[in-house]
Amino acid sequence: MDDFMAARAQMAMSLGFHIIFSCVGMVMPFLMAFAHWKYLKTNNEIYKGLTKAWSKGVAILFATGAVSGTMLSFELGLLWPTFMKHAGPIFGMPFSLEGTAFFIEAIAIGFFLYGWDRFNKWFHWFCGFLVGVSGLASGILVVAANAWMNSPAGFDYVDGQYLNIDPIKAMFNEAWFPQALHMSVAAFCATGFAVAGVHAYLIMRKKNVEFHTKAFRIAAGFALIGAFGAPLSGDIAAKSVAERQPIKLAAMEAHFETEKSAAFVIGGIPDEEKGEIKYALKIPKVLSFLVSNDFNHEVKGLNDFPRDEWPPVAVVHYAFQIMIFFGVVMIIIGIIYLYALFFKKEWLNKNWLLKTFLMASPFGYIALEAGWTVTEVGRQPWIIYGIMRTVDAVTPMPGIQYSFYFFTAIFVSLSLIIIFLLRRQIQMVPKLYDPTDPQFNDKNKKS
């Protein structure tokens, strides 16, 4: 592995790891706040226990996200110093504001964890809700910085110089809203399905059934919001990509020849040498309609662009197909769940429905990782789209592959620690969080 590929692999691994905890930090506090609100409205002690259980999980994952995010910020400077030298003054504002949101989140989560029976009950609830708001803001601000890489704005590029810098315009670039919206919706979908899957598994094991049923239904509700919102936000994002980065769109669809009434491609194996895609199902005119609301719209193909500006077509196309596939599967599961909720309530307690959610628990994160692969790999060979190539931004220091191995070992270790801590939290539900369990009452009597 040469240094350039090692640097890219390290960033990919770090982003792929961190994005999971970013999504949890954006969404899990809202589940926690909703459970807390239910407790305040109903005085049902199960919701109080559920809120406390989820809050401990939020704290664990918040700490992990803070560690991985800090490592990622150092990697930007260490691996891509030329990029940061020029880009830092332009898109530094969202990173600064993200730091502010992070500090608010840290303070709010501290207040929430230690504020039980100390604060006014509604102020205490607001602290939990604020954790979610600040976490969501952090994610959106980081996406704004990434969006700038896809749609550079807020400066004039003259003779290799970055002049007339406008940080506000850079932050609110044309890609900011579509990316931030789609990322936020995807985070709700992925986290909702993951949490629902865990509680579905525990219901099937007959462990604290009432406790986990309430948790499952809250998580499933949030999952459905994300699943049904994803096609709408994805449509906005796709139209934005078609306008700003037509070569990325062409790679997503393995669309080689410019044509009107372009077909939407499902599946297939791209052949970059021959400029064709084999074994694909093509739906006539749909791609043209999706990017412009016009069935006869002309869609540019890869062959209209210089070959040295093509992204890795196969990687982008397969990642896009994976994202679409799992997104559709989650929508179908959402429709089945809604049908059960309104018309077939007896299905809600059936093992087959719970098993469906259990199997779907990783689907949102698979789709999320695939979507970010489309975003990042589809921008190649540019680190700043159309201005700076990735190969020109990498550090000249040798031995990057050893850094990659070291950081990989750290992330693997963190993953094992997280699994251990979350597993222990689940095991403590009967003793600490479920007031209907005899073990909970025994512990309280002893204390």
Image: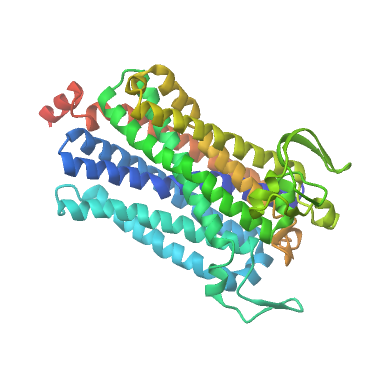
Q: Report the side of 211 relative to 14 (left or right).
A: left
Q: Nearer the viewer, residue 312 or 254?
A: 254
The residue depicted at 76 percent of the width and 44 percent of the height is 254
Quarter of the figure that contains the C terminus: top left
Q: Which image quarter: residue 161?
A: bottom right
User: Residue at the right extreme?
Assistant: 274
* Count of numbered marks: 0
The residue depicted at 62 percent of the width and 55 percent of the height is 239
Q: Position of residue 206 (x, y in %)?
A: 31, 18
Q: Position of residue 165 (x, y in %)?
A: 60, 78
Residue 39 position (above or below residue 181): above
Q: Position of residue 230 (x, y in %)?
A: 51, 45
Q: Is residue 59 visible?
A: no
The residue depicted at 14 percent of the width and 48 percent of the height is 117
The residue depicted at 37 percent of the width and 38 percent of the height is 221
Q: Is residue 237 visible?
A: yes
User: Residue at the bottom extreme?
Assistant: 164
Q: Nearer the viewer, residue 115 or 195?
A: 195
Residue 193 position (above or below residue 8): above
Q: Position of residue 68 (x, y in %)?
A: 50, 49
Q: Report the side of 388 relative to 101 (left or right).
A: right
Q: Nearer the viewer, residue 354 or 262?
A: 262
Residue 333 position (above or below residue 36): above
